[in-house]
Image: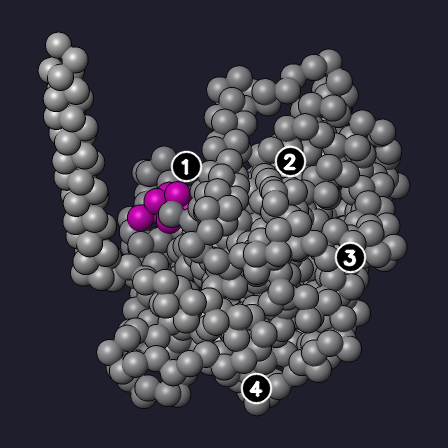
Amino acid sequence: MKALRIKRSRCSYQFLHLFIQTVCFYVKQMDINIEEAKKDLGFCTAQEDQFRAKNRKKMAGGGAAPAAKASEPVPHPPKDQLPNVSYCITSPPPWPEAILLGFQHYLVMLGTTVIIPTALVPQMGGGNEEKAQVIQTLLFVAGLNTLLQSIFGTRLPAVVGGSYTFVAPTISIILSGRWSDEDPISRFKKIMRATQGALIVASTLQIVLGFSGLWRNVTRLLSPLSAVPLVSLVGFGLYEFGFPGVAKCVEVGLPELVLLVIFSQYLAHLIRPGKNIFDRFAVIFTVAIVWIYAHLLTVGGAYNGKPPKTQASCRTDRAGLINGAPWISIPYPFQWGPPSFDAGEAFAMMMATFVSLVESTGAFVAVARYASATPLPPSILSRGVGWQGVGILLSGLFGTGNGSSVSVENAGLLALTRVGSRRVVQISAGFMIFFSILGKFGAVFASIPAPIVGALYCLFFAYVGAGGLGFLQFCNLNSFRTKFILGFSVFLGLSVPQYFNEYTAVAGYGPVHTHARWFNDMVNVPFQSKAFVAGVVAYFLDNTMHKKDGQTRKDRGKHWWDKFKSFKTDTRTKTPV
């Protein structure tokens, strides 16, 4: 029995030894197959990993990257300044061309200048005369603010005009229920004076944050990664004013959109390429053609018998606006009477001012990019915000019924024309002031059908959104941290305002609904701005997630912008200022 046990144990040992040898053989064979598969699929070996790590160190240290083989695709190098811009900030085009380009900027900013008073003045109780006067005032103040911003503020070619952000708190003032005047004109003036008081108080927020340097400390932490959602949704977030505006009168808006794309993107390369005539003046050409076409439809009776809403969108004979405008009128402060002040309304308007501050920061970044300027130093952004606060103060003093911010559509026009000259924008400010004083002539241009304006928005808002996406070239898109911050912030920037807007449309008030109306507005207004939500979320995540990691700094692209924090680190920073 003992011999049998020894024999069995030897057999078991031999079997176990044979099993282990077999397993080791197959493991080695699998390793060989895996290495071969890696080579077949293009995976890096250890030597390739070391080689690429050396290249990354050279690139981070400012050294030149090794020359790529002819068969390998070469990535596009990041550019601190946007190339292929014909005229940058300090290099103006010839005077005749500059005047035409300035007039084109004036035409583009007319859309918002007309749409906002058209929506607000009737709700206030005003008629055509009051509407024309508010448009004149808004145009006059926009000209002043544009000059102040281009001379003393950021000194960028940024047009400063009306803002949709201030519409919600203004409507809240209209619906406050404390206006019991039977005379609509008297009611209009009282509401306008209340709006003036709220704007005057709210302007102090931007003035203090800007001129004290507090906003400089905030923007110092802005990186290319956190700028992408902010700038992108400054443009893309206004999609509701694009094609929905075109669809209000498809027979007018769609031809404008098609012709604008053809003139700016196709004809410029087919007829006299290199002259930059059709793309640079595409707005003037297409607006003139479609405006004449729409006028022929109006005169021919195409809209006779149509619903009033269709006629308001399609017809070109806005006799009420032209007849209501005076021949010559100079807007002046307190033209509606002394402003009235309410603490709740002032706090609500102050929150709208803060939202406008964030949106304008993104718009300033886009303007600097399309003007071929270097990334803006935080001190310049802070100074621009301070002067924008002065602009809101002027809006309150003159009584525009609306605040002011950087015009997003005019920022997109810089991309279309490839002209970022400061002189062009200053000339456009001259047109604003001139036509605001000559009311009849200004009213003629203000009668451009809204679908034409919507078609222009489709292109210009898209340009600004694409400008924001362009900052991804400074970020590491292979980083999961980058993907999370980018995707999460953009998604919330679209989803959260969608919920707030849908809730308001159905219920008639926002999700936050208490007895304190001013508190409701302070909470509801910011969450209705797509750029604000996306920018705040991206900024918070980018400055709190794994910030101490050395690789994170490179992944977020911060090292690309650090050299532009002050004038001493890069001589090009002195150019735009």
Residue lying at the far top in this picture: please name it.
1
* Mark 1 or mark 2: whose residue is earlier in sequence: 1
The residue sitting at 36% across, 35% down in the picture is 307
The crowding category of the residue bearing disc 4, from other C-alpha atoms within 10 Å (few below 14, some 14 to 19, many at least 20), is some
Work out whether residue 455 or residue 377 is closer to the camera in this orientation and state it: 377
Judged by its main secondary structure, the magenta piece is helix
Secondary structure state at the residue bearing disc 4: loop
Question: Residue 93's x, y, as percent?
Answer: 57, 86
Q: Nearer the viewer, mark 2 or mark 4?
A: 2
Question: Residue 258's x, y, as percent?
Answer: 30, 61
Quadrant position of residue 147: bottom right
Q: Is residue 43 above or below residue 427?
A: above
Q: Is residue 114 above or below residue 21?
A: below
Calculate the distance from the C-alpha at mark 3 to the C-alpha at mark 4: 32 Å
Q: Which residue is mark 1?
A: 308
The residue sitting at 32% across, 88% down in the picture is 272
Q: Which residue is mark 2?
A: 526
* Mark 2 or mark 4: whose residue is earlier in sequence: 4
Q: Which residue is mark 4?
A: 93
Q: Amino acid at mark 3?
A: Arg
User: Disc 1, disc 4: CB below 8 Å?
Assistant: no
Q: Nearer the viewer, mark 1 or mark 3?
A: 3
Q: Is residue 488 left or right of residue 146?
A: left
Report the span colored magenta.
244-250
Question: Residue 424's x, y, as percent?
Answer: 61, 77
Calculate the distance from the C-alpha at mark 1 to the C-alpha at mark 4: 44 Å
Quadrant position of residue 368: bottom right
Q: Which residue is mark 3?
A: 216
